[in-house]
Amino acid sequence: MVCKIRKWVLSDATDLAVALSNKKVQDNLRDGLPYPYTEQDGADFISAMLSADENETFAFAITVDEKVVGSIGIFRQGNIHRQTAELGYYIAEEYWGRGIMTEAIRQICAYVFEKSDIIRIYAEPFAYNTASCRVLEKAGFRYEGTLRSNAVKNGEVIDMKMYSLLKTEL
């Protein structure tokens, strides 16, 4: 299955709402997303991404056969970490396990390393999300360690894992 990443358009809000109105998807994301996730929530998110500084926020829709199936973004950090950026992503449940996210991560990392001065991209998946950890490894990220008791999700204290990819490793 071939995926492409592309800039968001407001008409993507419907597909975005479908993907995020799934508790299994949201259980693997940080808090703060409305549930159920509405088309208006999607339109608000897309508007924010389109108006963000393009040298700070690299946000894309993940598409398969022109349909939006997920979201991926790389977000520049500040101060002494200004050349470091955090990767975040999700994909609709029906597309899990098909290699789509690995390919989307490869595409966005290549784009960001080519178009910016970012030298390190990192991701912090929940330790229990073994599929997300595996996707990062398949995309070339290296495991750096476990962040013990690093978050509270759904009322539980959980570990997170740290992965990174350096521009020199691409």
Image (spheres, rainbow, N blue to C red):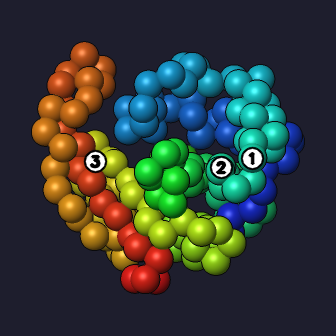
- The image shows residue 153 at horizontal and vertical percentages of 30, 25
Determine contact: label 3, label 1, CB under 8 Å. no
Residue bearing mark 2: 57
The nearer-to-camera label among 3 and 1 is 1
Q: Secondary structure at mark 3?
A: loop
- The image shows residue 17 at horizontal and vertical percentages of 67, 33
Q: Secondary structure at mark 2?
A: strand
In this picture, residue 39 sits left or right of residue 1: right
Which of the labelled discs sits on residue 53, or is there none? 1
In this picture, residue 147 sits left or right of residue 165: left
The amino acid on which the numbered mark 1 sits, given as a three-letter code, is Asp
Residue bearing mark 3: 129
Q: Residue furthest front?
A: 80
- Residues at marks 2 and 3, CA–CA distance in whole angstroms: 25 Å
Q: Is residue 19 visible?
A: yes
Q: Nearer the viewer, residue 52 or 103?
A: 52
When the figure is inspected, residue 139 is found, relative to residue 91, above or below; the finding is below
- The image shows residue 89 at horizontal and vertical percentages of 51, 50
Disc with the residue nearer the chain's start (3 vs 1): 1
